[in-house]
Amino acid sequence: MKPAPFAYAKARSLDHAVTLLDGAPDARVLAGGQSLVPALNMRLSTPSLLVDINGLPELGEVSRRDGHIEIGALVRHAQAERSAAVAQLAPLLARAIPHIAHPAIRNRGTIGGSIALADPAAELPACLLALRAEIEVTGRAGARTVPADDFFKGLFETALGPGDVLSAIRVPVPRSDARFGFAELARRHGDYALVGLAAAATADGGRLADVRLAFFGVGDRPTRTRRAEAALEAGDRDAAVAALQHDLSPHTDVHASAATRRHLAGVLLRRVAAQLDSPI
Amino acid sequence: MKITPDVAPSVSALDRPNSYIGRSVPRPNLARLTQGRAQYVSDITLPRMAHVVFVRSPHAHARISNIETTAAKQAEGVIAVVTGAELAKVMTPWVGVLTHLKGIKSAPQYPIAVERACWQGEAVCAVVARTRALAEDACELIEVTYEQLTPVTDAETALDPATQVIHPDLGDNLTFERKHEAGAPDQGFAQADAIVETTFRFGRHTGVTNEPRATVADWNPGEQRLTVYQGTQAPHMMQNLFAKHLGLEEHQVRVLTKDVGGSFGIKVHTYADEMATVALAKLLRRPIKFVADRLESFVTDIHARDHRVKAKIGVTRDGTITAFEIDDLTGIGPYSVYPRTSGIEANQVVNLVGGPYLCPNYRARARVVFQNKNVMCQYRAVGHPIATSVTEGLVELAAAQIGMDPLELRRRNLIPDDAYPATGASGIKFEALSHHACLAHIDSMMNYAGLRAEQARLRERSVRRGIGFASFIEVTNPSAAFYGVGGARIAAQDGATVRLDATGALFCATGVTEQGQGTEAVIAQCVATAFGVPLERVRVLTGDTDNVPYGGGTWASRAAGIGGEAAWQAGKSLRANVLTAAASILQADPSKLDISNGVIVDADSGRERIGLDEVARIVYFRPDTLPPGFQAEMVATRHYVPRGYPFAFTNGIQASYLEVDTDTGFIKLLKHWCVEDCGTVINPQLVDEQIRGGIVQGIGAALFEHCVYDERGQLLNGTMADYLVPMAPEMPDIEVSHVVTPTADSELGAKGAGEAGTAGASGAIMNAVNDALRPLGAAPITEIPMTPDVVLRALNKI
Amino acid sequence: MTDRVRVALTVNGERVDAEVEPRQNLVDFLREELQLTGSHVGCEHGVCGACTVRVDGTIVRGCLMLAVQCDGASVESIEGLSDSGDIADLQAAFCERNALQCGFCTPGVLLTAQELLMRSDGAPSRDQIREHLSGNYCRCTGYQAIVDAIEAVALARQGPAR
């Protein structure tokens, strides 16, 4: 499976990357390449140009700024996995990242790449939804910030336009009463999840407030389940599970039927709800 | 488990000093594999070598109306574009039938489809170019006009009159049917107090060898010789077939097999695209390389084990099995694979159901039907997993129905260990098995009583653990009864040539082959022991039809039992020759001498008399000093074929301990055990590792692997992301132990062991899952793979 | 055909200058251009791990990196790690325990095991070893012997038994 021919250009700066993308409408950004290259190998993707952004060290930093942790798009999953700052300031991400594929993939795959691809069964897009994260996009008109709630639009479809580069993500530093939960079900370690759930909430007396449940693997994009969230805030786990009937429209594929996915979503909801009830 | 060092036996059952029989010596060929210095066919480059890529049909069944090749021919780097019609002039088609499978029929298959594509993935055109990438580019410029035909994709309706017949000349879609009846099954069922009747379904799956199929073919017009580098298990068989279908003499063809990145039966068959590669080399007069990429592999490597078995068992209240009955339906591809046929798997199912048991009442019907899906043929443990899962599934369901412990039901029905020789209800002949000894051993090895207690304790906390067993028999060391009697030119015998080199080292050429199971080591151990040298002094050559004795290769677990015996006999024979020469040099009596640790010694005292290197020096360079009229022969060739029994059956029992998460339907394998009897064990570590690897393949079938087709004959999950193979975190540790019942059909007494693991694993796991879920009143699961869908449905949760 | 790109890299300590097609991946470059056939191609979708090589000190999938991306990089394959002696104990343990059969996955497994052992604080458990191997497909061994061998080396590298 050899790719169709393409030209290659290595960006010297973020602006240069944007200029290169502008020049070729079907160009693709090459970051980690762990999802792009298989698609090229199978000729599912046949761009005329690859714009390599791996030479932009400014995109590879983890920093704290304005009450947020900012993770550059080029931060490798492995780097984030080992980062004390991520563990402390974005514990939900720290819990999710070890589920991504395998060590050799995590050594090259990037946080930005995973968000930009927005595979419906991927962990990080759901985490960003749960965390109310912001995504920084740099394009022709400069940099703009897109809230996670507005970023994931459809199957592999995001707010990124053809000339855009996802440059960073920003996650609010958690408050002391923050609660997180994460669980996924995959047939084998590192596989895309059959169903997964990334969740955040705030402890409010004996209850949960501001519950955000982001399921992955059950639709064309990470999916919030509003009725289930309301039920958890009301303290009713059974009602939350029942609400999934309305909130989720899972698909059937070779790995699991829609009915199985819906059932597993309910199981995960109970498990994650238990996690939310405990402090970090 | 740690690495335990090899221990030399103080007394060898075969009475040789410094015997290697029974020793876990490391394989001599491992260094190159761990250094990345092996030579797989996919590594080979030859001068002027070109690459072939095939355009493959996207349709399961379609007439090929036209192939537009002009643009492709002009593309960069393209050397040739060849259609099926053009290649048919170079290579003749073949038909996968054998006479001993009565009534089997199939249609001629061409190296590249000529008029019709009959499965999604079948090659319809070949592009040869300087690089693989350029050939793939050119393939995109080829326009094939297809006229879609109705695909036949449901085995259940394949024989209905209304269903399209794939090959009209054949009359219907029936490849092969076999019926068998023994004893009085109806009476047996009438006598039963309990009858279990159910339907088993086995998901079609495939081998997924790590190294894909690869062939490099080189036709030298100057020498009029064809050299084929191929990762085949049976080089002589392929030599014959290449010659036959290209109109060459066999001696014009040389097949070379060095390192093979996994086979498990996948690479013992004849593939249209590999035959096409060879034909293209002859047509284009330059080396051609074909390496299937992973997506191609999924739609062209043989699939296996797509069976639906209606099955029935009768049992009395006191635990006597009174009858077995099966009706097996299997849907293969549009062609019976050549030359071993796609009827063998179903034939084996009929042969093996009920095999471990005394019950004489048995009725079986098996039908093999054509489908417009990828071809199906023999894959590790051919038919055994089906037969064993059905038999052992029925046994445990019956045990549950009468409230008897599953091991106890087996104790009451397994053929007693002293009842041999015996004949099974299907007519199979057993020399000597050890079902009861193996059962007793596994009972204690796994602490069965302790596990049952643990299971009961945890059940009270709603933790659902299951214990399941599978007793099994395995076909090994096949005689000509397997293929030869049907007219196939597949050798049942095998040979070894052993030669003393000028420095006193040994060189052995063997007809059996290596795909990682350790053939080279086992052969070396036999030769070193029979002859009398340290293992490091033996070099083994496999996989070269020019330079090894005519043999069958490695399949059906024959390499150690048959290849090893030939090597053993050749080693003994050469030892006799060398002792004769040494005796003439020493003016001694050869019967009073022996070879020990590379030195000629006095047999009784062990006193060293003369070195092998010295004997070699004299024989090769100073024959003037030998007595007149004496000619030393420092080479010996011996062949061996089992004659006492059609197959050397082995036996064993496996057990699975697992936990079912009844919320999610996920299954966690906690531990697995196997007690196996393969007769004399030549290298315990290698045998145990074969069993472990085989068990994990069975686990794959039980839980993960399934080639999923839709009703249009499209394979839906033909990638490594969607077809799930077993990976390390999900696999259990596996404990292996042995009972030893040597075969008297050879001096070594070794039977085969390569497939035992796969034979029993999926049945044991299926039984364990049902054992875990039975207290919940769940419907028994009788289909594999047991995915969360399947388990949750059985629990009525979806 | 698209223009070739000049790259200069180090492979197993040796400087290599080449002109590569952008679409050629790293493992094909090693195998075809440099005849370093010890790294293998099993799937070309990054799943099987047979192509695992080291780039700038970390293991990567050779089928998912392009040769052009390796300009200025230090690439190490099984041949280099073998000749340097860095993994001699792993290789010896694999041989003794028969932690390989056909050998096709073995170079990838060895490189992955070496990274695990170099990054671990203390000896990893069997479960941790299995988890780290989650991206290395072996069809022959069933994994247990591989885990045994890596575990033995992990313990041996800790030093004499306490």
Image (cartoon, coloured by chain):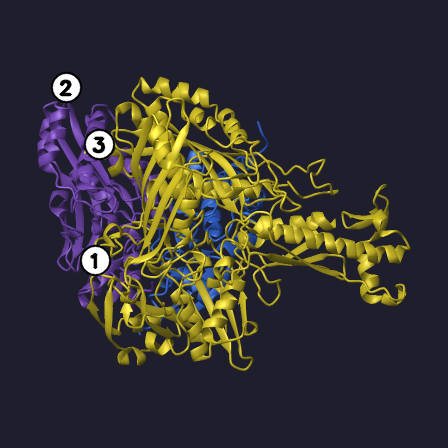
- Percent x, y for residue B271? 40, 63
Residue A160 versus residue B229 in the image, above or below:
above
SS for dot 3: helix
SS for dot 2: loop
The residue to which callout 3 is attached is A268
* Viewer-nearest residue: B688 or B720: B688
Residue B712 versus residue A257 in the image, above or below:
below
Amino acid at the residue labelled 3: Leu
The residue to which callout 2 is attached is A205
Amino acid at the residue labelled 2: Gly
CA neighbours of label 3 inside 10 A, class few (<14), some (14 to 19), many (20+): many
Label drawn at residue B163: 1
Rendered colour, chain C: blue
Rendered colour, chain B: yellow
- Labels 2 and 3 share a subunit: yes
- Percent x, y for residue B331? 31, 53
Rendered colour, chain A: purple
* Viewer-nearest residue: B448 or A21: B448
Number of residue marks: 3
Q: CA distance from mark 2 to mark 1?
A: 68 Å
